[in-house]
Image: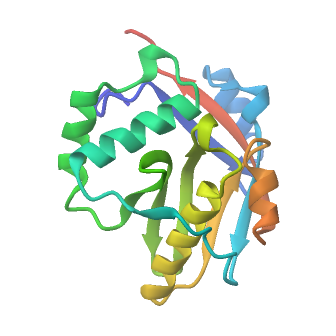
């Protein structure tokens, strides 16, 4: 975390994690439970999700400015405190570092010409893992989240790996289930916050 500048890290533990007392050990070492984001469903989709609504453009970001706007929209949607946010210049730099990477791709959705939300796609030989899906409050209920899911499904199909996985907590699980995903496991998420030392 110190090397990359990350301030918060997550440990995901499931019923398959070893050793059996791993959660207790991690808590003893200073990790913590965030009650509102502790139980996370691991979900899978292997059939096409609903089509995106008309008028919503969802696709990979294509420039540093689009990347910065998408991450800023995510930071707003997740209500990240100022000390955890990256500023615009840092986001431009992050985009430049990520451009050669076609495995972890940031998608954004535009509603009425504005970035309405974003989410990542991590491509693998077996499908796409979605993460970070978020929609700005002003755009919620208009289909932007659905459009982001469909765009990543279409990309998975193009690569010959028609499957989506996602980890969903209480906030995103309702829409994920409505889109046809099925739970395959349950995680417990612990958080590690880097101290100033």
What colour-coding does the image apply? rainbow
Q: Foreground residue, 94 or 41?
A: 94
In this rendering, the count of numbered labels is 0
- Extreme residue in the bottom direction: 160
Residue 162 visible in image: yes
Whole-percent x, y for residue 133 in the image: 57, 50
Figure quadrant of the N terminus:
top left
Figure quadrant of the C terminus:
top left
| Residue 113 falls left or right of residue 164 | left
Q: Foreground residue, 26 or 119?
A: 119
| Residue 149 falls left or right of residue 160 | right
> Compared with residue 197, is residue 111 higher up or lower down, i.e. above or below?
below
| Residue 41 falls left or right of residue 73 | right
- Quadrant hosting residue 87: top left
Q: Foreground residue, 113 or 101?
A: 113
Q: Residue at x 30, y 67 (%)?
A: 102
- Quadrant hosting residue 7: top left
Q: Foreground residue, 60 or 191?
A: 60
Q: Residue at x 36, y 40 (%)?
A: 69
Q: Residue at x 80, y 42 (%)?
A: 170
Residue 15 visible in image: no
Whole-percent x, y for residue 31 in the image: 62, 25
> Compared with residue 155, is residue 80 higher up or lower down, i.e. above or below?
above
> Compared with residue 181, is residue 15 higher up or lower down, i.e. above or below?
above
Whole-percent x, y for residue 14 in the image: 74, 52
């Amino acid at each position: 975390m110190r090397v990359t500048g990350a301030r918060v890290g997550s440990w995901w533990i499931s019923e398959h994690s070893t050793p059996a007392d791993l959660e207790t050990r991690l808590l003893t070492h200073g990790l913590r439970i965030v009650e509102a984001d502790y139980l996370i469903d691991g979900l899978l989709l292997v059939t096409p999700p609903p089509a995106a609504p008309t008028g919503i453009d969802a696709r990979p970001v294509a420039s540093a400015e689009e990347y910065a706007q998408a991450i800023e929209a995510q930071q707003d949607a997740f209500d990240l405190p100022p000390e955890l946010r990256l500023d615009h210049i840092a986001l431009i730099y992050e985009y430049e570092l990520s451009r050669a990477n076609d495995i972890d791709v940031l998608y954004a959705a535009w509603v009425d010409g504005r970035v309405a939300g974003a989410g990542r796609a991590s491509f693998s030989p077996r499908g796409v893992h979605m993460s970070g899906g978020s929609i700005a409050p002003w755009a919620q209920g208009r289909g932007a989240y659905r459009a982001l899911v469909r765009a990543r499904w279409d990309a998975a199909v193009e690569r010959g790996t028609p499957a989506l996985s996602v980890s969903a907590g209480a906030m995103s699980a309702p829409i994920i289930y409505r889109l046809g995903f099925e739970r395959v496991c349950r995680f417990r998420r612990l958080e590690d916050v880097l101290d100033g030392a």
